[in-house]
Image: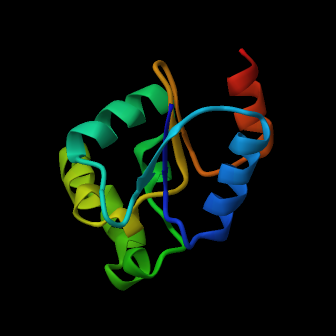
């Protein structure tokens, strides 16, 4: 599995501790220094089954500074993927990517259910 996170984020730290506590192996990737590409984001979005809007870190400074709350509805999917690929801090985190799934944000019940399958 691939675990994409921002090491200074408390939620990411909590998710990493949770994964390690269950003895799950994963590859760690820092979203700030190794931002996902538009292609990766598109594939992970497909695997997640979430609306594209849910991939955005809506509580982030960049999201607010760019006024994305009002702009996303007028952007195409391709434009949204490209925008997300410009700055890892725009992307909801942590992200856990498996062969057939992608989880955005750490919600323990959802992660427990997905990883017990």
The answer to which quarter of the image holds residue 73 is: bottom left
Q: Position of residue 27 (x, y in %)?
A: 47, 40
Front-most of residues 78 and 115:
115
Q: Position of residue 96 (x, y in %)?
A: 54, 39
- Seen as rendered, the residue at the extreme top is 117
Is residue 83 shown left or right of residue 14? left
- Above-or-below relation of 93 to 96: below
Q: Position of residue 53 (x, y in %)?
A: 44, 52
Q: Residue at x 67, y 69 (%)?
A: 10
The answer to which quarter of the image holds residue 9 is: bottom right
Is residue 10 shown left or right of residue 96? right
Q: Residue at x 25, y 56 (%)?
A: 85
Q: How many marks?
A: 0
Q: Position of residue 109 (x, y in %)?
A: 80, 38
Quadrant of image for the C terminus: top right
Is residue 3 shown left or right of residue 88? right
Q: Residue at x 29, y 38 (%)?
A: 40
Front-most of residues 18 and 112:
18
- Structure colour scheme: rainbow
- Above-or-below relation of 56 to 51: below
């Amino acid at each position: 599995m691939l675990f994409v996170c921002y090491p200074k984020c408390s939620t990411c730290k909590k998710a990493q501790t949770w994964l390690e506590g269950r003895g799950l192996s994963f590859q760690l990737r820092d979203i700030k220094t190794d931002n996902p590409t538009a292609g990766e984001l598109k594939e992970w979005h497909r695997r997640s089954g979430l609306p594209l809007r849910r991939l955005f870190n809506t509580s982030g400074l960049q999201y607010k500074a760019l006024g994305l709350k009002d702009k996303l509805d007028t952007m195409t999917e391709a434009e949204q993927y490209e925008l997300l690929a410009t700055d890892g801090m725009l992307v909801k985190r942590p992200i856990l990517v498996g062969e057939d799934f992608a989880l955005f944000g750490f919600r323990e019940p959802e992660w427990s259910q997905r990883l017990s399958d």
